Image (cartoon, rainbow, N blue to C red):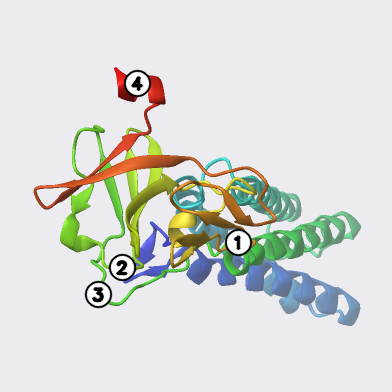
């Protein structure tokens, strides 16, 4: 899913996280070499690396928080993974702030307490980095999917179910569009059988089906490969076991409208 905090579609968060990662690891290396070899200039450089790393960590956290709450699908395994990633990053930041404050300045040589806090911080950094990489490479957070001939925006927000979500011409065969209608995330698309609309939330781990592949009238989740019939919502292939919620969709006067499905009783009335 495309990052909301980006520059020309390039996510800002991964651009900035390289700085605190490199600076915190370098600070531990400088401290260790400086103390073992008796080189004060190295542990002084290590202290400045911590200071710079703390500043860059705060800057990197801002676009990271934006992506966590606006890009990562709600009620999904990626959202809980993102929370763990964020909490670990906050812990790392606090640990290195504590190290800088404990030492008091660049002239103070690191002692056992300083080394222990820094080592714990770097260890937590590795775990957080693993979680962050999983968010990108498995959950595809920040990945900008593009389709030939698609409009620039594949996400629209509609405040009322009675309003159109897009023009009929906006959806070519095989294309999907995410419509947020009064808080509901609905995928609208066109397959060989015509227009269809279904819930964006994969019933397995909450993956965003709007980023999935539509083959014929079957959509495949980009995270774990679950497949659903887009008209009935039934599972075509697992690991998902529960059916997908579908919606009614209509094309009128060149506009596409989506509505919650009505029961047979409601239709009869």
Foreground disc of the pair 4, 2:
4
Q: Residues within 10 Å of mark 4 (few under 14, many from 20)?
A: few
* Residue 173, numbered circle: 2
- Answer with mark 3 or mark 4, whichever residue precedes in sequence: 3
Give the CA distance from mark 1 to mark 4.
Answer: 36 Å
- Answer with mark 3 or mark 2, whichever residue precedes in sequence: 3
* Residue 223, numbered circle: 1
Mark 1 element type: loop
Q: Is residue 194 left or right of residue 170?
A: right
Foreground disc of the pair 3, 4:
4
- Answer with mark 1 or mark 2, whichever residue precedes in sequence: 2
Give the CA distance from mark 4 to mark 2.
Answer: 31 Å
Q: Residue at 76% of width from left, 57% of height from top?
A: 124
Give the CA distance from mark 3 to mark 2.
Answer: 11 Å
* Residue 266, numbered circle: 4
- Answer with mark 4 or mark 2, whichever residue precedes in sequence: 2
Specify the quadrant that holds the C terminus: top left
The picture places residue 200, in percent across and down from the top left corner, at 46, 48
Foreground disc of the pair 1, 2:
2
Give the CA distance from mark 3 to mark 4.
Answer: 39 Å
Which is more toward the observer, 171 or 81? 171
Give the CA distance from mark 1 to mark 2.
Answer: 23 Å
How many marks are shown on the rendered structure?
A: 4
Q: Residues within 10 Å of mark 1 (few under 14, many from 20)?
A: many
The picture places residue 35, in percent across and down from the top left corner, at 86, 74
* Residue 149, numbered circle: 3
Q: Residues within 10 Å of mark 3 (few under 14, many from 20)?
A: few
């Amino acid at each position: 899913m495309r990052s909301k905090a980006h520059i020309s579609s390039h996510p800002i968060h991964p651009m900035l996280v390289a700085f605190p990662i490199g600076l915190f690891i370098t600070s531990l290396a400088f401290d260790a070499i400086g103390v073992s070899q008796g080189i004060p200039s190295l542990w002084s450089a290590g202290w400045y690396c911590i200071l710079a790393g703390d500043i860059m960590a705060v800057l990197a956290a801002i676009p990271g928080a934006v992506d966590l709450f606006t890009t990562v699908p709600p009620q999904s395994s990626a959202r809980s993974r993102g929370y763990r990633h964020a909490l670990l990053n906050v812990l790392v930041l606090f640990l290195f702030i504590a190290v800088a404050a404990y030492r008091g300045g660049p002239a103070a040589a690191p002692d056992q307490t300083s080394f222990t806090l820094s080592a714990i911080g770097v260890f937590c950094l590795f775990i957080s980095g693993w979680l962050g990489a999983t968010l990108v490479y498995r959950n595809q957070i920040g990945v900008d999917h593009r389709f030939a001939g698609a409009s620039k925006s594949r996400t629209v927000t509609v405040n009322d179910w009675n309003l159109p979500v897009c023009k009929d011409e906006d959806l070519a065969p095989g294309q999907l569009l995410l419509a947020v209608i009064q808080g509901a995330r609905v995928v609208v698309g066109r397959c060989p059988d015509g227009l269809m609309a279904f819930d964006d939330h994969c019933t397995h781990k909450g993956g965003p089906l709007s980023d999935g592949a539509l083959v014929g009238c079957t959509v495949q989740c980009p995270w774990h490969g679950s497949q659903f019939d887009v008209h009935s919502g039934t599972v075509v292939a697992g690991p998902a076991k529960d059916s997908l919620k579908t919606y009614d969709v209509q094309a009128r006067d060149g506009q596409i409208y989506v509505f919650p499905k009505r029961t047979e009783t409601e239709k009869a009335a």
